[in-house]
Amino acid sequence: MLINGLQQSQTREDLRNVLNNPDFSSKTVNGEVKFLPNGDRQGQSVLLQVQPSRDHPSGYDFEIIDPKKN
């Protein structure tokens, strides 16, 4: 999301203005991200934890933390 904001700006002030724009949205691997006027993310957030992984080339992968289990 930050990269999408940087693509639309030339300075730090421009980036702040882009991210503060209520019409700003960003497409991510988890879908489109939009924000409420108060700056909170619109929709449900997901908490992830980095875990060691034999399957991922980096040796690590993300695991969703289920708040109902904690």
Image (spheres, rainbow, N blue to C red):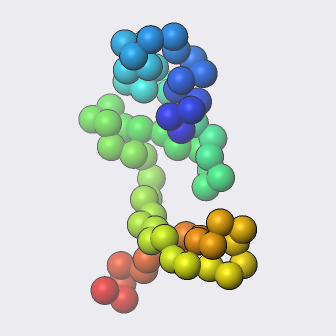
Residue 48 drawn above or below residue 16: below
Q: Quadrant of residue 40?
A: top left
Q: Does residue 21 appear anywhere in the picture? A: no
Name the one closer to the observer, 68 or 9.
Answer: 9
Provide residue 23's location: percent of width, then percent of height: 49, 25
Residue 22 drawn above or below residue 2: above
Residue 21 drawn above or below residue 48: above
Question: What quarter of the picture does the C terminus occupy?
Answer: bottom left
Name the one closer to the observer, 3 or 70.
Answer: 3
- In this rendering, the count of numbered labels is 0
Provide residue 47's location: percent of width, then percent of height: 42, 66
* Residue located 72% across and 78% down the image: 55
Provide residue 42's location: percent of width, then percent of height: 42, 46
Q: In the drawing, does residue 35 fall left or right of residue 58?
A: left
Please identify the residue farthest to the bottom as the structure is shown.
69
* Residue located 55% across and 79% down the image: 52
Name the one closer to the observer, 16 or 53.
Answer: 53
Please identify the residue farthest to the left as the structure is shown.
38
Q: Does residue 4 appear anywhere in the picture? A: yes
Q: In the drawing, does residue 26 fall left or right of residue 66?
A: right
Q: Quadrant of residue 32?
A: top right
Residue 36 drawn above or below residue 62: above
